[in-house]
Amino acid sequence: MSVLERIHFEIIVAVEKLGTVTAAAKKLHLTQSALSHSMGKLEKSLNVEIWRRQGRRLVLTQAGEYLLAVAERSLTQFNHAEECLHQFARGQKGVLRIGMECYPCYQWLLKIVAPYLTAWPSVDIDVKQKFQFGGIGALFGYEIDMLVTPDPLFKKKLLFEPVFDYEQVLVVGKSHKLYGLDFIIPEDLSKEILITYPVSIDRLDIFSQFMVPAGIHPKEHKVIENTDIMLQMVESGRGVAALPRWLVEEASHRFQVAPVALGAKKVQKQIYLGIRENEGQIDYISAFLQLAREKNNRS
């Protein structure tokens, strides 16, 4: 019989979050003595200390820190499993939790969500944008059910499928000297202020696939999180940017900007949808994948 039980995970997370045994016991609907007895029994069974007292405070030991990390991951999975079972019991299909791992992917996702919600009225969608380049862990940890990313990491037990093809381009204002060119070469950016999303350089295509191989760096590199602000900066001549061509073309009626190809061969990219391997046959997940494929084929 297992010594570790779910209540131990709930206790250590509650104490860490709330700061005291009293508050944790109240949240978990336990008496303080029952909570202390449960953790004391665990420590005795495993012959390890979870906490040490420092004055009035409880401080996690090394073993306690490890147990807390395991508890946070495990409780997420427990809660997800329970919610799914409750949904099945109520005859509902569920909630599709989608993690975003790139900034412009959100605009693409909106094109899929609207028809999907119409086709699947019993399924809700929850979009989580906090997983900027941490989506693989979120998939493994059952925090999300699907990951939208242009840079998949192919791992065992995960499936990634390309669902949208696009071209990464330079964005320039209509008064910029590069406006109207069929394409630019890396050297053209050596005297430019380049505006990008706040992402590490090794994950920015304009660097990794265009400038770095040529040994070129921009005059200055600025980061902006909001797409509209980025386009306004480009329009006003404050710099150039790198974005998907489709996004620039859609924004061209609101901003005086234009796309220019990155090199004669261009920089081609794809948006991928990642899921857990054993969930590919779940009807509402496979339906979302199918809708994304069909949308790409019609584009």
Image (cartoon, rainbow, N blue to C red):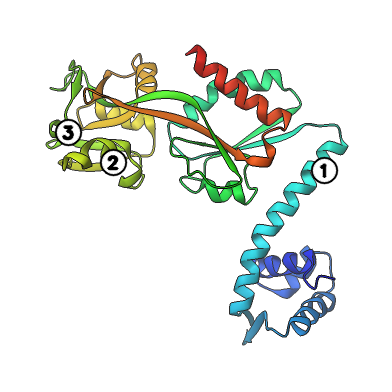
Q: Position of residue 173 (x, y in %)?
A: 22, 22
The disc, 3 or 1, on the residue closer to the chain's N-terminal end is: 1
Q: Earlier in the sequence, mark 2 or mark 1?
A: 1
Which amino acid, by three-letter code, is at mark 1?
A: Leu
- List the single residue furthest toward the right: 89
Q: SS of the residue at dot 2?
A: helix
- Residue that mark 1 sits on: 85
Is any part of residue 58 visible from this angle?
Answer: yes
Q: Which residue does the numbered mark 2 point to in the structure image? A: 208
Q: Is residue 258 left or right of residue 126?
A: left
Query: Label 2 crowding class (10 Å Cα cut-off): few <14, some 14-19, many 20+?
Result: few
The quadrant the N terminus occupies is: bottom right
Which quadrant holds residue 224?
A: top left
**Mark 3: which amino acid?**
Pro
The answer to the question of whether label 2 and label 1 lie on touching residues, with beta carbons closer than 8 A, is no
> Of the numbered discs in the image, which one, if any, rests on residue 209?
none
Q: Quadrant of residue 264?
A: top left
Q: Quadrant of residue 17?
A: bottom right
Q: Position of residue 216 (x, y in %)?
A: 16, 41
**Residue 198 percent location from the top left of the image:** 35, 44
Residue annotated with mark 3? 186
Q: CA distance from mark 2 to mark 3?
A: 11 Å
Q: Identity of the amino acid at label 2?
A: Ser
Q: Residue at x 84, y 69 (%)?
A: 30
Left or right of residue 25, residue 61 in this image = left
